[in-house]
Amino acid sequence: MAPQIDAPDAQRIDASNRIVMPGLVDTHRHMWQAAVRQVAADWTIGEYVEHMLGGIGPKFTAEDVHVADLLSGLEALNNGITTIFDWSHIVNTPEHADAAVGGLTESGIRGVYGYGLPRTPAPSWYTADAARIRKTYFSSDNQRVTMALASLGPEFASMEEAEVDLRLARELDLRTSLHLGCGLLGGMRALTGMHERGLLGPDLIFVHCNTCTDDELRLIAATGGHVSISPRVEMQMGHGYPATGRLIAAGVQPSLSVDVVSGVGGSLFAEMRGMLEAERGWQNHQALQRGEWTTRLELRTRDAVRIATLEGARTLGMEDRIGSLTPGKQADIIMLAVDRPNLALINDLPAAVTLADGENVDAVFVAGRLVKANGKLLSHDLRNMQDRICASRDRLLPDVATAV
Ligand SMILES: [Zn+2]
């Protein structure tokens, strides 16, 4: 790194009273649910499966997916997230996939589009359509938006269907993300089953893993797999206790995700806090059960910042491009204003980051391009999108639309 850069024509940006850091990385978010926010705020996982996946999801048109992905990408950028994995299990028709890619790309965020079916059995066009999307939009893996497969996996589909997905993804040279260890479904020991079939590998991103056994978590570590945890959704909906400490003990550094934006807010700062609180609560509870005081908190605020940045990049296979401020990487950079009432200067740098919120995100760069400056998004005016967002909400939630 050089002490100064000789670039007389460059735009100068004042970074005084700013924390300059890598952009946050969200490794699992169902962006298609951005226009139906709050409806899942009091739901269990059973209610979510019944009402969101069984009721609202099938009503989604391609236009609904497009506007939700665009809105969700803007929300993420506004909150300092520069890279996001769009877990898009809303491919009701091939047009829905095109619409999601369009919305995600237009938002200006760096993203991984996770092509996913909403339910099984798979329609006849499934594998050919996934290949079409790969060929049409993602001929290079060095683009700002790339592709992965979002598989329902052996807990939400069957082991045989999961195998079809993995074969397809590996033919198309894509990573696969799948939910695993979700509540009582973890009792199926699907991860052990995948291991016995020789399906595990470094191209897999397991989401949640709350009710996986420690042995299963060690299998992920041994095969180079990755894990994304969503502590707030997991604690609300009944996935099980967030596995943060167990994962780290098993040799897996997790990454963080928001998950269900129809249930929780879209902030990864809040997710860092949720992870720290859950893990510390667990450590303290365990110590008290043994009749001891906790003398040192194992999971540190510095860990949370690394998990929300560099570990996210590693989960997505992008650590050569993003996740840290390192010469040679892409300039995905955020600037946090600390001269705000909630921070009021810095006394502990990692702690200040975990206590930040969207109001502190003053500037955001994606691949060196300024997308938020002086606290305002530059590329899209949300007021101009309001009609589309309202029309989508009214189509999807007619009862709510008449009540408000
Ligand atoms: Zn999810």
Image: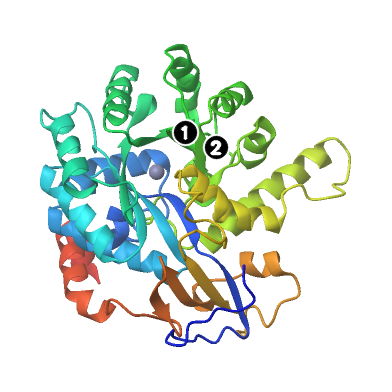
Relative depth, front residue between 189 and 350:
350
Quarter of the figure that contains the N terminus:
bottom right
Which secondary structure, mark 2? loop
Spot occupied by residue 8 in the image (x, y as percentages of width and height): 47, 87
Q: Is residue 279 left or right of residue 175?
A: right
Q: Which residue is mark 2?
A: 240
User: Measuring 62% from the left and 35% from the top, which residue is drawn there?
Assistant: 247
Label 1 is placed on what type of residue? Cys
192 above or below 388?
above
- State the residue in front, 273 or 200: 200
Q: Ligand 1 falls in which quarter?
A: top left
- Label 2 neighbour load within 10 Å: few <14, some 14-19, many 20+: many
* Residue 179 vs residue 218, the one in the foreground: 218
- On residue 182, which mark appears? 1
Image x and y of residue 377, in percent: 36, 78
Placement of the C terminus among the 4 image quadrants:
bottom left
* Residue for point 33% across, 26% down: 166
Please tell me which residue lies in front, 128 or 397: 128
Task: Assess whether mark 2 and mark 1 are in contact (beta carbons under 8 angstroms).
Answer: yes
- Give x and y (percent) for residue 250: 66, 30
Residue 265 visible in the displayed image: no
Task: Note whether ligand 1 is within 8 Å of mark 2.
Answer: no
Q: Residue at x 14, y 60 (%)?
A: 395
Q: Name the N-terminal-most of marks 1 and 2.
A: 1
